[in-house]
Image: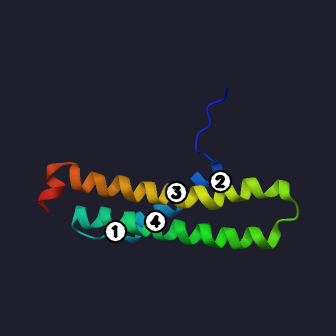
Amino acid sequence: MRLQIFVDVTSIVFFIIILAIAIAVYYRIPSKKERLLGIGSFVQTLTLGFGLVYAVRMLAVVDSMSEIGAILAVCLLTPFYGILANLVLKMYVLFGRSEIQAE
């Protein structure tokens, strides 16, 4: 029996690129709490948008039923990673270090 995990290399690469863009956009915010919450929201929004755009692209280029699985994995996993990142950042801000909560 094989252990299946929610990992797709394309989704992870897109997620890392989106995370880097979010960090670059929110880098100059002085409050660490506001910065982390902004990054989480921005990443979630971009990954959901990316999943929608990739789904539309899938409908345009798919020729056979065998190609749908790989493309659908990217469509679903990239937003999942964005939502997971937002959740982790919110939990870190709310229950994490005391210097973040004090700001």
Q: Residues within 10 Å of mark 3 (few under 14, many from 20)?
A: some
Residue lying at 42% horizontally and 55% vertically, measured from the top left = 85
Report the mark closest to the observer, 2 or 3.
3
Residue type, label 1: Gly
Contact between labelled residues 1 and 2, with CB atoms less than 8 Å apart: no
Residue 77 image offset from top left, x and y in percent: 58, 55
Which residue occupies the extreme right position in the image? 64
Q: Earlier in the sequence, mark 2 or mark 4?
A: 2
Q: CA distance from mark 4 to mark 1?
A: 10 Å
Which residue occupies the extreme top position in the image? 1
Residue 10 is labelled as 2
Q: Is residue 69 above or below residue 21?
A: above
Q: Earlier in the sequence, mark 2 or mark 1?
A: 2
Residue situated in front as seen by the camera: 71 or 23? 71
Residue 31 image offset from top left, x and y in percent: 21, 66
Q: Secondary structure at mark 1?
A: helix
> Label 1: which residue?
38
Residue lying at 59% horizontally and 39% vertically, measured from the top left = 5
> Label 4: which residue?
44
Q: CA distance from mark 2 to mark 3?
A: 13 Å
Q: Is residue 28 above or below residue 15?
A: below
Q: Earlier in the sequence, mark 4 or mark 1?
A: 1
Report the mark closest to the observer, 3 or 1.
3
Tally the numbered discs: 4
Residue type, label 2: Thr
Residue 80 is labelled as 3
Quarter of image, res 86: bottom left
